[in-house]
Amino acid sequence: MMSAVLWSITVLALLVSWWRNPERTGKALQVSGRSLKGLAPGLLGMVALVGLALALVPPEMLARLFTFKGVTGFAVISLVGALVTMPAPIAFPLAGSLLRVGAAPAALAAFITTLTMVGIVTAPIEISYFGRRFTFIRQALSFVAAIVIGLLMGVFL
Amino acid sequence: MTKLLKRYRLFLSMVAVNLLLALWNPSLAALSGAKSMSFLVEVLLIVPPVMVLMGLLDAWVPRQIVEAHLGKDAGVRGAGVAILLGTAAAGPLYAAFPIALSLQKKGARLANVVIFLGTWATIKIPMIIMESSFIGLRFALLRLAFTVPCVLAAGYLMEMMIPADTIPEMTTEQG
């Protein structure tokens, strides 16, 4: 669904751009093509890594992790969220069912935040754009932020 | 040739791991391949249009506009614009990197670039609707309320820690 919207917007933008100035649009597409070419190695690596991780760590095992209690559970869940990147349409139903099984809301909040903000598997792509230093600091700060958000949620929920 | 090998090292080492896995446990290797393929389809549905949008952004949005709204002089308003841009977008975080870099090259300050990435990752209107329907409205709104200040803090902290000139030129130029 999301990608349908994305493609429609892109095609529309491209048509408007072409209508306004075909030459400039051609230049824009050259930039896009070069960028895509530069991204390809990182993307392929990430795709293979995610496939392997999903095969080695079955969803049932992931679900079992959430039954840990206390600080250990909180830490483990945040780390899993940082490693794995999951699309939101899968992450939220999973989080909802985990909540009904008895997972702590605080841990779930930290999990969702690390899941979306921190991605060890997407790090190679981020590095290719922004360099090691930026990537490391951003991911570390986001991880800390996820812990803070989780703890605050624990206090308020 | 060695440069090409180096750029593909992650992919090649993953292929090697899968081949070893195929010797030891063929069904697991097959599962890994299948999961990779379905993820590849997902990536191919998202990345090409984002790249085209990025190219158009590069060609049509003048530097002065980015500088005025996301640059040093934009102040608090710059953070607001960065948040709005982040929530309006669709797609996973790795799709945001090229757009963020292009904004940075056009004069957006680093704090605003990081704030843009943070909101892109965590705050999206369709995602909030999904989150409240699967987990609960109270949970979704509280998480939103705590996430915004954290994203802002991360943005300004990063700007203090990283001089902007340490960010490499677009690696894509190496072709």
Image (cartoon, rainbow, N blue to C red):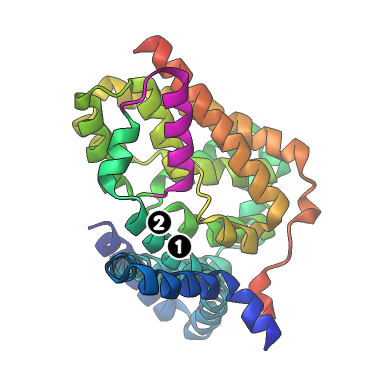
- Say which chain tag 1 marks: A
- Say which chain tag 2 marks: A
In magenta, the rendered stretch is A67-85
Image quarter hosting the C terminus of chain A: top left
Residue A83: x %, y % from top left: 47, 46
Q: How many marks?
A: 2
Residue B131: x %, y % from top left: 27, 34
Q: Is residue A16 above or below residue B100?
A: below
Element type at marker 1? helix
Q: Is residue A79 magenta?
A: yes
Is residue B115 toward the left or the right of residue B141 in the image?
A: right
Instruction: Kindly identify the residue that appears in the image at 27 percent across and 60 percent down.
Output: A5
Is residue B170 toward the left or the right of residue B138 in the image?
A: right
Q: Nearer the viewer, residue B85 or A123?
A: A123
Q: Is residue A28 above or below residue B160?
A: below
Residue B113 visible, this angle: yes
Q: Quadrant of residue B139?
A: top left
**Looking at the rendered structure, which numbered label has been put on residue A49?**
1
Q: Which residue is mark 2?
A: A53
Tags 2 and 1 in contact by the CB under 8 Å rule? Answer: yes
